[in-house]
Image (cartoon, grey):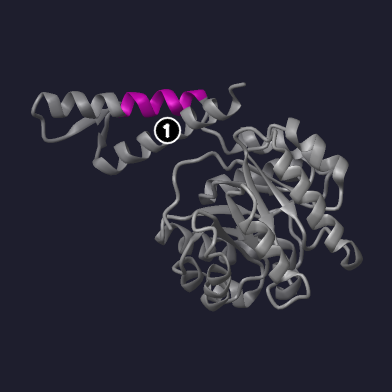
Amino acid sequence: MPDTIRPRRSLLFMPGANTRALEKSRELPADGLIFDLEDAVAPDAKEGARASVVAAVRQGGYGRRELVLRVNPLDSAWGEADLVTAASLPLDAVLLPKVESAERVRETAARLSAAPGLAIWCMIETPHGVLAAAEIAAAPRVAALVMGTSDLTKDLRAREMPDRQPLLTSLQLVLLAARARGLAALDGVHLDLADDTGFAAACAQGRTLGFDGKTLIHPRQIAPANAAFAPTLDEVAQARAVIAAHAEAIAAGEGVAVFRGRLIENLHVEAARRTVVLAEAIAALDRP
């Protein structure tokens, strides 16, 4: 399920049981919201959280934000009901936790037959999931792979390092799987809310690797994530100049185009066009 060019700089997890947060999230400048029925909700609060999310989503008021529901595992006591609920709501996607096989995606897709436009996002947060990322990305209706770096760090028995060196192989394998299928790829959360420097570094690293954006756990992380994963004004200006230089060369019948002393090929023009379209999509999302 190829991804369209859509801003996904910041995807904020919203605990489904926190009705006040669900209300306030209508005013937040995140590109998307992930209503969480899984990790952020205690077992005895699952039913109430689902009802709260249903009420909030049906009330509307979330503007152009992408709306995603993180459901409980299909084999849990709540998974089936979560999917039935997802199929009945005006959502963009469901987010499946701890996906380790394409079969899990197919089982989910079968239960969402009543909502064919609802995309499936998959959290990759275990060693099995990382190793199966390519087959998961190829499964029907998958539109995004989302890193679950906290659980993955635990399962790898890795140390938490500021440079995330122990996770780099996993991050790149999942990113490769997503890009091979034209899917979105989202980096994992940063848990230390007091570590602004570390969060900025993780965002910069995620963008350098190629991720579209980052999943977040607190509204204070939205602005720096939006800034980190958006094209800068200089990048947009250069992209437009590359497109123009290539078009001028083609119009003049020249076989190659040169921009600031560098050869421009079709791949550079394609990347430049994506930068411009993304910038325009961000501007449209931010417009009242």
Residue drawn at x 86%, y 53% as measured from the top left: 17
**Does the magenta-highlighted stretch encompass residue 178?**
no
Task: Tell me if 104 is positioned left or right of 218 in this view.
Answer: left
Q: Amino acid at mark 1?
A: Val
Residue that numbered label 1 is attached to: 277
275 above or below 39?
above
Nearer to the camera, 172 or 84: 84
Q: Residue furthest right?
A: 44
State whether residue 171 is above or below residue 58.
below
Residue most toward the left? 253
Magenta segment range?
A: 233-242
- Magenta segment, principal secondary structure? helix
Inspect this view and state whether residue 220 appears. Answer: no
Q: Is residue 176 left or right of residue 128?
A: left
In the drawing, does residue 213 fall left or right of residue 152?
left
Residue 57 in percent (x, y) is at 71, 44
Residue 50, how many percent across, how many down? 79, 57
